Amino acid sequence: MEKYITDERTGLKYELVGDYYFLAGDDEPEKRSIGIWGQRHQRYLKQHCKNVYAELLTSGKLNEYLADMNEQAEEMFSQLVKELAEKDDITEKLKTENQMLWVRRMNAVLETATEIVNNEIIYT
């Protein structure tokens, strides 16, 4: 038996390990992290959209879907924090002059951005 074989139909390479052929390491798809936003959306799907969750899970597309959702939410969150901080005039100068005020105002911005992302992306 050959050590490596290639499936002509799919182009995937397999390696002989013992008596069985396993997918060779180079051809394994890269597993992406789903992050906190993806985990929140996964919980939402499990509780409120069971059919969608089951379909994604059985088709093998759940991790990819959640990783994409996480990236979108992270980008939106970062952009919102930046915009809201600029709008509220929260600057490095304020941070050096009055740290407690800066922390209070930044916490409010972070909370607002989190709520917007949750309502716009995660819990829909």
Image (spheres, rainbow, N blue to C red):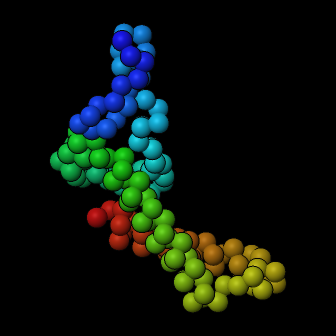
| Residue 109 figure quarter | bottom right
- Asked whether the viewer can see residue 31, the reply is yes
Q: Which residue is drawn at 43% across and 29% down?
A: 24
Q: Nearer the viewer, residue 22 or 7?
A: 7
**Where does the image place residue 55, in percent across and percent down from the top left?**
20, 45
Q: In this view, does 20 lie above or below 68?
A: above
**Where does the image place residue 70, in percent across and percent down from the top left?**
43, 58
Specify the quadrant that holds the C terminus.
bottom left
Q: In this view, does 28 lie above or below 66?
A: above
Q: Nearer the viewer, residue 5 or 111?
A: 5
| Residue 30 figure quarter | top left
Specify the quadrant that holds the N terminus.
top left
- Asked whether the viewer can see residue 40, the reply is no
Q: Which of 7 and 77 is in front in this view?
A: 7
Q: Which residue is drawn at 82% across and 84% down?
A: 97
| Residue 117 figure quarter | bottom left
Asked whether, in this view, residue 99 is left or right of residue 77, the answer is right
**Where does the image place residue 107, in percent across and percent down from the top left?**
61, 72
**Where does the image place residue 108, in percent across and percent down from the top left?**
57, 75
